Amino acid sequence: MKPDPTPIKTWLIVAGLAGEPLPQLFDGFCNRLVAAGVPLARGYVSTATLHPLLWATGIVWQQGRIIDSVDINYGFETGTAWLTSPFRHMLESRTWKLHRRLTGEGALLDYPVLLEFRETGMSEWLGLFYGFGWGLRHHQVEEDKVRPVRRDPLEADTAVLRFGHSPAFLFQRAAQPAV
């Protein structure tokens, strides 16, 4: 049975309009997903900036709490982590949703980080990109010509609510117990 997204959406709107800082907003969002029955093991949100030294900032949520805040400086795009990242592929190919099974039949580990996630017990990876009407690519701002995404906010195959506040975020599911 799919969780009812209404209470989470309502809380998200109220907290966002009240000016809740992004770390608390994301922490509350992830914890509410888990409380609603979504098997969420890890979440990441990244927001592009117009800062002269920072390309983006990111927040990592895992096992019920924020575990890391990340500043992503310009120049990161020459590092191996970025060059082999599913996010790089998504950004450069304008792929707004990428889903990978990490275990079992149909597992696809085409990026090194997905193998790392599988080794920590995660069974699925979902990456989503959202924009604000403009897009940032490495060192430039350009007009975004992508049509808005207007779908059911609850993904049936991954049971993840769309966050929509940030250009990028991802969720990994906890591994399902062996039967």
Image: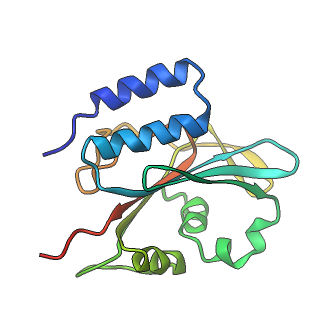
88 or 179, which lies in front?
179
* Colour style of the rendered protein structure: rainbow
* Residue lying at 54% horizontally and 19% vertically, measured from the top left: 17
Count the numbered circles shown.
0
Q: Is residue 81 above or below residue 3?
A: below
Q: Residue 87 location in percent, x, y?
A: 57, 63
Q: Residue 74 location in percent, x, y?
A: 82, 59
Q: Is residue 135 left or right of residue 53?
A: left
Q: Is residue 65 left or right of residue 107?
A: right
Q: Is residue 149 above or below residue 96?
A: above
Q: Is residue 162 visible?
A: no
Q: Is residue 7 above or below residue 173?
A: above
Q: Is residue 42 left or right of residue 93?
A: left
Q: Residue 158 appears in which quarter of the rendering?
A: bottom left
Q: Is residue 120 visible?
A: yes
Q: Residue 84 location in percent, x, y?
A: 61, 77
Q: Is residue 32 left or right of residue 46?
A: left
* Residue lying at 43% horizontally and 75% vertically, measured from the top left: 120
12 or 105, which lies in front?
12
Work out which quarter of the rendered image holds the C terminus and state it. bottom left
Q: Residue 114 location in percent, x, y?
A: 46, 75
